[in-house]
Amino acid sequence: MELARLAQLSHPFLSQLERGQARPSMVSLERIARALGSSQIELIAAATDDLVPGESTARVSVVRKVEGPQGPFGGGEARILVHGDAPFIPMDFRGSNTSPGEFYRHDEAEFLHVVSGVVVVDLADEGQFELVAGDSVHYAGGTLHRWCSPRGEEYHLFIVKERRSGA
């Protein structure tokens, strides 16, 4: 019931999702992800067992350039760069959004490194930072955050997010 309220989706719809009798639209998936303090790509990865704790006992995870769950993340597209139960989630992210959109907030700390392009990272009360290739930013869990391209040009980020505790 609480998830339905937070995601602004009906309880019967969420029950159908849980039983595999319905498929969410990307809008519904975004609402569910936000309500859980997660992202669409992390939910997609969990659904494919790529981030399910205990599913992988391997000590090494190799992800080839054509592998890894891919999907929407923070105004662009991300690809998760690890399989299985890692203590962090590294992602390759590309975007060109000029609007930062709504703020995101989750309990996990996050690290962003700009591989190419220019990105403005808005951390609400902590300030706005224009970052160029080679720059990085780390922020603690609970920090409101969003980002965009100041000129609509593509930017490329390497993102590392802590794994959700209890995930």
Image: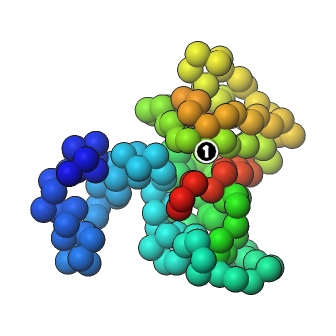
Expressed as whole percent of the image width and height from the top left, the position of residue 85 reads 65, 71
Expressed as whole percent of the image width and height from the top left, the position of residue 36 reads 41, 50
Compared to residue 60, the image places residue 88 above or below, namely above
Is 83 on the left-hand or right-hand side of 124?
Answer: right
Expressed as whole percent of the image width and height from the top left, the position of residue 61 reads 76, 78
Q: Residues within 10 Å of mark 1 (few under 14, many from 20)?
A: some
Most foreground residue, 151 or 104 = 104
Q: Spot the residue most to the front.
A: 166
Q: Residue at x 48, y 53 (%)?
A: 39
Q: Residue at x 19, y 70 (%)?
A: 16
Most foreground residue, 55 or 120 = 55
Q: Residue at x 24, y 76 (%)?
A: 19
Is 113 on the left-hand or right-hand side of 127?
Answer: right
Expressed as whole percent of the image width and height from the top left, the position of residue 100 reads 51, 32
Q: Spot the residue most to the right.
A: 134
Mark 1 = which residue? 108
Location of residue 21 by image quarter:
bottom left
**Visible in this render: residue 139?**
yes
Q: Residue at x 55, y 72 (%)?
A: 52
Which amino acid, by three-letter code, is at mark 1?
Glu
Q: SS for tag 1?
A: loop
Most foreground residue, 60 or 23 = 60
Compared to residue 91, the image places residue 44 above or below, namely below
Color scheme of the displayed model: rainbow
**Visible in this render: residue 96?**
no
